[in-house]
Amino acid sequence: MRGLKFIEKFKSTQVHALNQQDASSGGCNGCANGSKLSNHKRTKFTGSKSNKTKSGSVAQALLPYGLPSTDLLEPSIDPHLKPIHCVKSLADLYRRFETCLESDKSMLFIEQYAYLCGLGDAKLLRRCLRSARQYAGDLHLKVVLSAWLKFERREDELLGSSSMDCCGFILECPKAALISGCDPNSTYDHCKCFEENAKSNLGPIVEKFVCLSLEEDDSVTFCVGDKEISFVRNKIASLSTPFKAMLYGGFVESKRKTIDFSHDGVSVEGLRAVEVYTRTSRVDLFCPGIVLELLSFANRFCCEEMKSACDAHLASLVGDIEDALILIDYGLEERATLLVASCLQVLLRELPSSLYNPKVMQIFCSSEATERLANVGHASFLLYYFLSQVALEKDRVSNTTVMLLERLGECSTERWQRVLALHQLGCVMFEREEYKDACYYFEAAADAGHIYSLAGLARAKYKVGQQYSAYKLINSIISEHKPTGWMYQEQSLYNLGMEKIVDLNYATELDPTLSFPYKYRAVAKMEEGQIRAAIAEIDRIIVFKLSVDCLELRAWLFIAAEDYESALRDTLALLALESNYMMFHGRVSGDHLVKLLNHHVRRSSPADCWIKLYDRWSSVDDIGSLAVIHQMLINDPGKSFLRFRQSLLLLRLNCQKAAMRCLRLARNHSSSEHERLVYEGWILYDTGHREEALSKAEKSISIERTFESFFLKAYILADTNLDLESSTFVIQLLEEALRCPSDGLRKGQALNNLGSIYVECGKLDQAENCYINALDIKHTRAHQGLARVYYLKNERKAAYDEMTKLLEKAQYSASAFEKRSEYSDREMAKNDLNMATQLDPLRTYPYRYRAAVLMDDQKEVEAVEELSKAIAFKPDLQMLHLRAAFYESMGDLTSAVRDSQAALCLDPNHMETLDLYNRARDQASHQQK
């Protein structure tokens, strides 16, 4: 194994294409989703206007609540599970996947979801939910998971959509969710949603069976008051065992021709319906009120087939939240499982709006309600996990959130479930400033084995005056466990002066993705009068991990520095991420600050905005481009193509949820059908429905041949392993797109994509022409493609120079440093990759390259450590796979198996890791023998 050149292996694969995760590294995962528990607390203000860093009355007017103070800065407590040994926990999950029953897999995927929430990878989390739904056989699990998947797609934001609309797949189909049983192989297939057949005419059926009844000799009459209804004795006896015993057993009724039913709680109409049912076995012939009476009758007299028929029919009638609220009480009273499931499905698919309906919350929040749901098999940890996560996202300190989390704890059956409920209750109580309750819940979670909850316990103790106890608690964690970034971040809260800074610096070294240390250091520099140094400090994290709180802080700093144009840019970008964001600790709306800042910058016309956009785009300034587009949308909010451009930028910045929201807004504001189809196609593509997205693109082309429709179709088709014929077709589509009207920004992207396809086909001259043409219209990223062409033509120096040109225009581009490293010698490559890591520590290729170099130099321990320091804050598939390979070559098969299992927990279909895992496991087993 040592003889293999790891460095060469990784350089060869890197030339062709970067790891997809690397390409999208940095940015914020769902930073605009409104979940405040997942970000830092909004910064508190000193209220002072005499801060020495501020100069000028304008800055004072724009900072009415003063600048933030280091004394009041505090990171929020992560509400998710945070295992002390993440890799070990993932490996354990995969081992359990291998040995568990198929019926247990669904909840194992939910456990995986809970552990991966802290990583913030929206696609990975969605895959967990889809896998959980795939293996869900229980009716209740199907209903909850289908609704959860729908909620994650935020279809409620699409104009004209209904909560019960079907996306066309079994996975999320509301009707398929109401069918018991599990077929994992068909879950991703199309469902069969057809309109119900017209109701049959009752007349002929009744007449037919009336004739039959006249042929029966053995009849019995049931009386309700003075009304008589005749039954065929053996038909009503067949309804249930009690009726059979009454009519054919030793009871007096077996000898009678007439039986009085006046005191059995059934109406004349209900009893007539029972008679019709005995002959037709149908309940769809009656109005809902009569069917409800039949359901009650069936329950009282143990008529199981009739009850099932009533249950199914009533379930099919639930179409909206009003129906659900009316019928769910009947279902709970009569224990009609399917009816309750159907009502529950509507209520869940109406989230988040149904969260604010007091009648809905009454069904879910009280202990009595939970007990009633449990009686019909519809109270579960999964249900309350879903509800509580929606509540946490919408209003983390509401009474509703607290009650749902309490029900979550009551429904917990496994340790991790109890830990999650207790920890999240602790987080909510801490946010509500109910510190004694927070202490109780955090301590209970810690006693159950969740070490991170001790950080919450320490915070709560500190708030109630137990400062030394808080410090001692955190210090004990550090002494007893392998240090991680969050431990030193927490310890810094209880230190002062340089000791605090030392802790924060070490926290950043161990986990550079923690934003609080950057924020604290920035504010500390500002308090010392070093505003530009403060801005440079917060820049360090913004360049790779965009978040609203860091953008807000930088906007304050720019205002203090009287750089109002930069402050306006950051505020506009912030509003693109979260449109309703409230600044200054929730006291001033972002929109209002934009209006104030606009008085102090030169007003831009639409033409000026387009010039700015081209300038920002060509300098690879994604945040600046985002701000310009948002300014254009303020002036003209109905422009759907601007919303679409905004979504593309947000995806590039790795803000997936915000990007999808913009895409939905683009669809809602589209002025034509062909345009709407394009945006719907992108939505489908981004949620994994490739074939349906392709269909939308083709339909759009059939209506009108536009740049965007051809580009969408080409993009979808190119996202596969293309053969020569397919590549030729994609080239034709992109050429057709380029012949359609569009602006230079989009045409530059099309030329860049076309160049990539030509490279894959080996047509380097054509690719070179495409990239040069893209550069002519200021598509700066084409330098990267052109460098690749030069490299493939064995012009390595030209490739290096081309990437240098890109870096001159986009100096903060970590990806550019990473790509340039491919075209230089080892020492220069090392320098470029070190710079890439410094700019964006989330990019994994530099760690893998450096580790491979160390392994080639026989420095095995150092190679493993290089990977381990990145895995500690980003458990990445490729890094885990490479470390497993290193462990295998070193003979540490136990560690190799563990890392392989953790990697397979992230992607169970990764063939190289599967091979490595099977090989290492077999070797370990052989050694034990």
Image: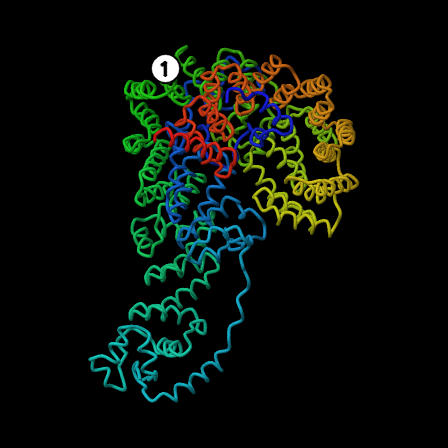
Look at 33% across and 84% down and name the residue there.
227
Residue 727 in the image, given as x and y percentages of width and height: 71, 40
Q: Quadrant of residue 837?
A: top right
The answer to whether residue 62 shows anywhere in this view is: no
Look at 52% across and 38% down and name the residue there.
123
Residue 647 in the image, given as x and y percentages of width and height: 62, 37
Q: Which residue is mark 1?
A: 495
The quarter of the image holding the C terminus is top left
Render colour scheme = rainbow
Give whichever of 509, 323 is nearer the camera: 509
Residue type at mark 1 is: Asn
Residue 195 in the image, given as x and y percentages of width and height: 55, 64
Task: Classify mark 1: helix, strand or loop.
Answer: loop
Q: Residues within 10 Å of mark 1 (few under 14, many from 20)?
A: some
Query: With respect to residue 610, does 304 lie above or below?
Result: below
Give whichever of 171, 210 is nearer the camera: 171
Query: With respect to residue 149, does 899 lie above or below?
Result: above
Look at 57% across and 33% down and name the residue there.
575
Residue 423 in the image, given as x and y percentages of width and height: 34, 34
In the picture, measured across the screen, residue 475 lies left or right of residue 672, that is: left
